[in-house]
Image (spheres, rainbow, N blue to C red):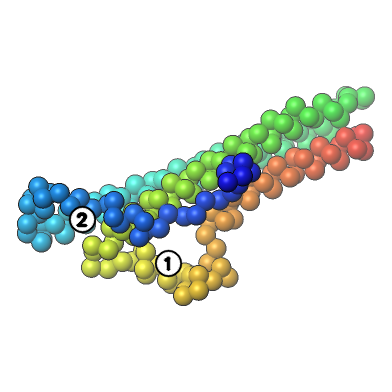
């Protein structure tokens, strides 16, 4: 695996079938505690509800992280624009380079945070799909995804938010680099 793909590539999402063999306790002591099917189903349902809640909380934290980075980048762009417009005469445009390095570094951090949340959610949703195998219905894994993507996993039907949100830090980084190049080349 290339270094570029390792740090900037998007890994394959976790699959339910890869998780299932490791999810269930086949220990005889565990089976003995849940001899009655009703108790077993109630335990699976409680674990399912808890796990879905945990996945939802990860999604909320992910949204907060995106809001934080979006606000921070918007403030940086605004500050650069305001201070650069009213800068003292003769100030070198090369002074933008340290700010550019910091801003692009911030965009990289944002990219990796989004990527990490995507990987974490992928694993959580695969576990949810595996838990749904023991429930009477599979509303998320079989139902929702089938409704959103269809048989062919058609991207025109549904684009996962992570496929869009992963580009936002790259667009901010592009804006920073493009603005710095324009300022340096024009000597403004």
Residue 70 shows in this picture: no
Label 2 neighbour load within 10 Å: few <14, some 14-19, many 20+: some
Q: Secondary structure at mark 1?
A: helix
> Which image quadrant for residue 136?
bottom left
Q: Which mark is residue 162?
A: none
Q: Position of residue 10 (x, y in %)?
A: 55, 51
Task: Give the residue number, with chain letter if any, for mark 1.
Answer: 145
Figure check: 142 above or below 163: below
Extreme bottom residue here? 151
Q: CA distance from mark 2 to mark 1?
A: 22 Å
Q: Nearer the viewer, residue 37 or 16?
A: 16
Horizontal and vertical percent position of residue 18: 36, 56
Q: Is residue 114 above or below residue 160?
A: above
- Among the two numbered marks 2 and 1 on one chain, the one whose residue lies closer to the N terminus: 2
Residue at point 58%, 42% (across, down): 7
Residue at point 63% right, 49% down?
Answer: 168
What residue sits right under mark 2 in the picture? 44
Q: Residue 57: in sight, yes or no?
A: yes
- Disc 1 crowd, CA 10 A, few/some/many (<14, 14-19, 20+): some
Residue at disc 2, secondary structure: helix
Q: Residue at x 36, y 68 (%)?
A: 142
- Tell whether 187 sits left or right of 14: right
The answer to whether residue 145 is left or right of residue 127 is right
Q: Where is residue 184 shown, x and y percent of the image?
A: 88, 35
Give the vertical position of 65 relative to 139 (above or below).
above
Q: Quadrant of the C terminus?
A: top right
Left-right relation of 29 to 148: left
């Amino acid at each position: 695996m290339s270094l570029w793909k390792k740090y900037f590539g998007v890994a394959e999402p976790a699959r339910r079938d890869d998780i299932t063999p490791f999810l269930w306790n086949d220990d005889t002591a565990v089976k003995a505690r849940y001899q009655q099917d009703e108790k077993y189903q109630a335990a699976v349902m409680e674990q399912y509800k808890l796990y879905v809640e945990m996945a939802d909380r990860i999604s909320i934290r992910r949204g907060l992280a995106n809001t934080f980075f979006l606000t921070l980048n918007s403030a940086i762009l605004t500050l650069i624009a305001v201070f650069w417009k009213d800068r003292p005469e003769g100030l070198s445009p090369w002074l933008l380079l340290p700010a550019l390095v910091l801003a692009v570094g911030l965009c990289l951090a944002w990219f990796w945070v989004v990527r990490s949340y995507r990987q974490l959610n992928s694993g959580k949703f695969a576990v949810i799909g595996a838990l749904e195998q023991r429930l009477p219905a599979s509303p998320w894994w079989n139902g929702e995804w089938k409704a959103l993507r269809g048989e062919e996993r058609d991207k025109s039907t549904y684009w996962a938010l992570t496929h869009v949100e992963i580009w936002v830090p790259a667009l901010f980084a592009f804006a920073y680099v493009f603005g710095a190049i324009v300022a340096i080349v024009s000597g403004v």
